[in-house]
Amino acid sequence: MFFNRKACCYLIGLFFFITLYSFGQNQEITDRLTKIYENNDLVGIEKLELLRDLSFNAVYDFELSLKYAEELISLSIIEDNNRYLFHGYLQKGNTNRFAGNLNNALNAFFKSVEVAMKFEYIAGQGAANIAIADVYSEMGNSTNAATYYDKGIQFLRKTNDTESLATALLNAGDEAFNTDNYNLALEYFEESGILFKNDNYLIGTAYNLGNIGMVYAEQGKDELAESNINEAIAILEELEDYYPISVYLTYMSDIYSRKKDFNTALAYLHRSLNLAQQYGLKDQISDANLKLTEFHERKGDSATAYKFFKEHIEYRDLVINLKSVQETADLRTNFEVSQEQAKTEISEQKRKTERLALWSTLGVLFLIGVLAYGLFKKNKFVRKTNKIIAFEKDRSDKLLLNILPEETAQELKDKGRVEAKQYPSATVLFSDFKGFTSYAENLSPEQLVQTIDYYFSKFDLIMETYGLEKIKTIGDAYMAVGGLSYDNVDQAKEMVLAAKEMNEFVAQAKNDDTTTATFDIRIGINTGPVVAGVVGTKKFAYDIWGDTVNIASRMESNSEPGRINISEHTYEIIKHDFDCEYRGEIAVKNRGVLKMYFLSV
């Protein structure tokens, strides 16, 4: 699935991971296993199996999962049991991979290969080599990734696990595409497509068809490209997986633009935009409008380009956020102007003083008086100017703190740039309003901004109360994070409390005469590692990235009006402080199945 080559390599890599390690567990089993472990009654094979299950079930609690994996490895060595030793190293690698510790993951996977070789465990050698290849792919090391994909595939061909083999072939084809080896990519995709079709694995079949279409498009085989992509889109529509459809269409537009077939490129762009609008895919609406802006700019049609650019801006950020950024730029300009103005006025004052000195012949006393008066005025002016500069600097600092966390703002002022930072545990919140899009269509721009400001201003105060950071708003969506200060150990609990206040405020607004715009809110929360940093040099923006953010977004989209939906990882942290309802395993687009919990009302 080549939406973004590197990003999608990791996304498709998850298919193998999910196939081999199904997330088909429930909380009751996890709790029961934990009680058995705490009783410490099991020995031998039963203890080894228990540790393996515990490490797997705790995969999102990195420290706990690693603890069980290390204990499994130690006990397997004592018991001289290579099969469980293999699983211990493999699970250790999987946990490190989820945590983003790719070098540690590689070391563990290599050890699992060594153990599997000792007792000739063919399926294990295949699984471990494919895991190594996936990690190298995430690192951007295409040469090593291709080598280990080939090794893993050779082992999996000797087993009866066709689904794992098909997924490995799909990932290997993706890596071949990343290195522009289109013929090899086609070989992998065609074989994996047959296996997926035989297993009736529709999502795998759809991605195979789409990937093959991308390869044909790069080779200039337009009819074959469109045929495969259209077939993939038909399956994805049946599965209601609309995001990849929209991205496939955008990618096709890029290809045809490069080939100078602008009519076809434009048709794909409009189709992508229409689909994104139909299903409320906000980021794709923004991307498609930006592509259309660039397209019409190249044609010299500024009026049409401006229209699409306005749509792009509307979905990328509301006027409130853009105004803050613009005020920062204006403030910086005003400050520089005031400095130049002060220099000019001081220089003029100096010339006045010199002219007064020429009249010194009128008398020494008169000269002293004039000089004293001139110095007094000059000092008074300098003090006044310094106060203005200090006031403007204070305004600039306060405005900067409204956009960036304090530590990041200070780093930006000191160094003129901000280094990206990785946080091992942060809690991310997403929210949006049910029915907002249709409601907003009937509002003027001023009314739209006033409505959003009414809710988001209160959300900002709630986040400030709990020491949390608002990251951004996109349309009616609100995104915040806790845990960007390393001493914030209760960030998950604080985010849940903030979410409950947001939910209560939105509910109370229905009985408040302050606004006639009332909605139901959906909220999703997830906890895990993130990377944070500042992007851009003009109109810069602070943002966070990582799988944790993607899962938090999925928690929101799978929530219900008036409810707070949290992930398994967040639940494990706050379960002793809040009552929660286990929802079961929910199918999530592009993620397989995930455990979800509603906070009790």
Image (cartoon, rainbow, N blue to C red):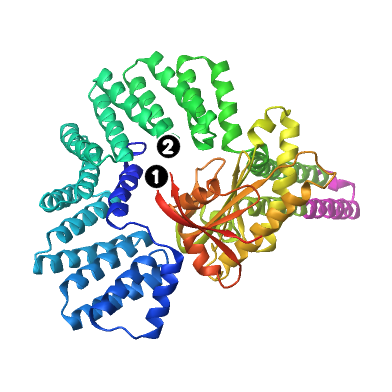
Q: Residues within 10 Å of mark 1 (few under 14, many from 20)?
A: some
Q: Which residue is mark 2?
A: 241
Quadrant containing the C terminus in the rendered view = bottom right
Q: Are marks 1 and 2 in contact (CB under 8 Å)?
A: yes
Tag 2 secondary structure: loop
Q: How many marks?
A: 2
Residue 84 in picture, x, y percent from top left: 21, 72
Check disc 1 and give the amino acid type: Asn
Q: Residues within 10 Å of mark 2 (few under 14, many from 20)?
A: some
In front: 312, or 476? 476
In front: 570, or 97? 570
Residue 545 visible in the snapshot? no
In front: 147, or 433? 433
Would residue 340 be found to the left or right of residue 4 on screen? right
| Main secondary structure of the magenta stretch | helix
Q: Is residue 178 above or below residue 586?
A: above
Asked if residue 24 lies in the magenta stretch, the reply is no
In front: 380, or 543? 543
Q: Is residue 581 above or below residue 202?
A: below
Q: Which mark is residue 590?
A: 1
Residue 539 visible in the snapshot? yes
Tag 1 secondary structure: loop
Measured Cα–Cα span from mark 1 to mark 2: 8 Å
Q: Which mark is residue 552?
A: none
Rendered residue at 52%/69% (across/down): 573
Rendered residue at 63%/61% (across/down): 600
Residue 342 in picture, x, y percent from top left: 73, 45
First to last magenta residue range: 358-384
Check disc 2 and give the amino acid type: Asp
Rendered residue at 66%/54% (across/down): 397
